[in-house]
Image (cartoon, grey):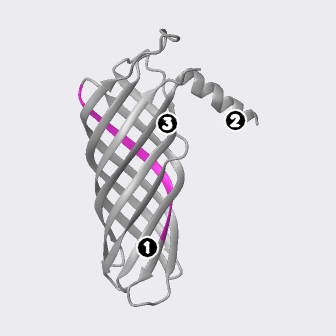
């Protein structure tokens, strides 16, 4: 209960951030397979860093970023398969330089992967950790309307961002350990805002 109250106080004082997006990419693993993926992600429960010292730099920490991706695995020493990746828990950080027109994300997550072989063989399940990052170019930056009831609060922003992302994962399934490297082109809608409290 105390942790929830502390989180509420932090959100009220430091503001919020929310990012939603998707991407298209290719992943290779240490078993020689290549996977083509479509992804959806959400950087949610973001706590905005107070921007008074650097008013044209926005930063936020995210308590529970999530990502879901699906695709097809081809080649390697295993049968071709349909793939579902889930990253349901982790931490992340974003930073945006409003004057320079760029931003970035960095995150650490738990990854779960289910594979359904196209030949009808038994499905497999892998789990592991993933480190990922992305660099974004700002397509559009818009200032949010300031709340009349809170003129002392810094401005809020809406950003549309696009750019490359990469991740490195160490995974384990019933066959043992393996690694994954993924490159994606990502789009993200991101907003830094203050709640009307």
Circle nearer the N terminus (1, 2): 2
Numbered badge on residue 61: 3
The quadrant of the picture occupied by the N terminus is: top right
Please give the name of the residue rendered at 33% of the width and 20% of the height, measured from the top-left corner. Answer: 56
Question: Residue 177's x, y, as percent?
Answer: 48, 74
Residue 151, percent from left and from top:
47, 9
Residue 101: within the magenta?
A: yes
Reading the image, the residue beneath label 2 is 4
* Segment tinted magenta in the rendering: 100-113
Which quadrant: the C terminus? Answer: top right
Q: Earlier in the sequence, mark 2 or mark 3?
A: 2
Residue 178: mark: 1
Image position, residue 6 (x, y; %): 68, 30
Instruction: State the CA–CA distance, disc 2 to disc 3.
Output: 16 Å
**Around disc 2, counting alpha carbons within 10 Å, would you say few (fewer than 14), some (14 to 19), or many (20 or more)?**
few
Q: Is residue 12 above or below residue 3?
A: above
Contact between labelled residues 2 and 1, with CB atoms less than 8 Å apart: no
Residue 32 found in image quarter: bottom left
Q: Position of residue 64 (x, y in %)?
A: 54, 46
């Amino acid at each position: 209960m105390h942790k929830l109250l502390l989180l509420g106080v932090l959100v009220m004082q430091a503001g919020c951030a929310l990012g939603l997006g998707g991407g298209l990419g290719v992943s290779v693993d240490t078993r020689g397979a290549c996977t083509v993926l479509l992804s959806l992600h959400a950087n949610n429960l973001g706590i905005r860093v107070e921007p008074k010292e650097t008013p044209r730099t926005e930063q936020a920490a995210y308590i529970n970023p999530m990502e879901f991706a699906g695709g097809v695995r081809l080649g390697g020493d295993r049968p071709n398969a349909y793939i579902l990746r889930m990253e349901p828990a982790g931490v992340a950080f974003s930073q945006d330089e409003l004057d320079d027109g760029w931003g970035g994300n960095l995150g650490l997550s738990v990854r779960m992967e289910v594979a359904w072989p196209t030949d009808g063989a038994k499905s497999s399940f892998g789990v592991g950790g993933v480190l990922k990052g992305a660099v974004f170019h700002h397509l559009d930056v818009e200032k949010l309307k300031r709340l009349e009831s809170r003129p002392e609060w810094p401005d809020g922003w809406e950003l549309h961002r696009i750019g490359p992302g990469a991740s490195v994962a160490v995974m384990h399934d019933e066959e043992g350990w393996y690694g994954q490297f993924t490159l994606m082109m990502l789009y993200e809608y991101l907003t830094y805002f203050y709640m009307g409290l």
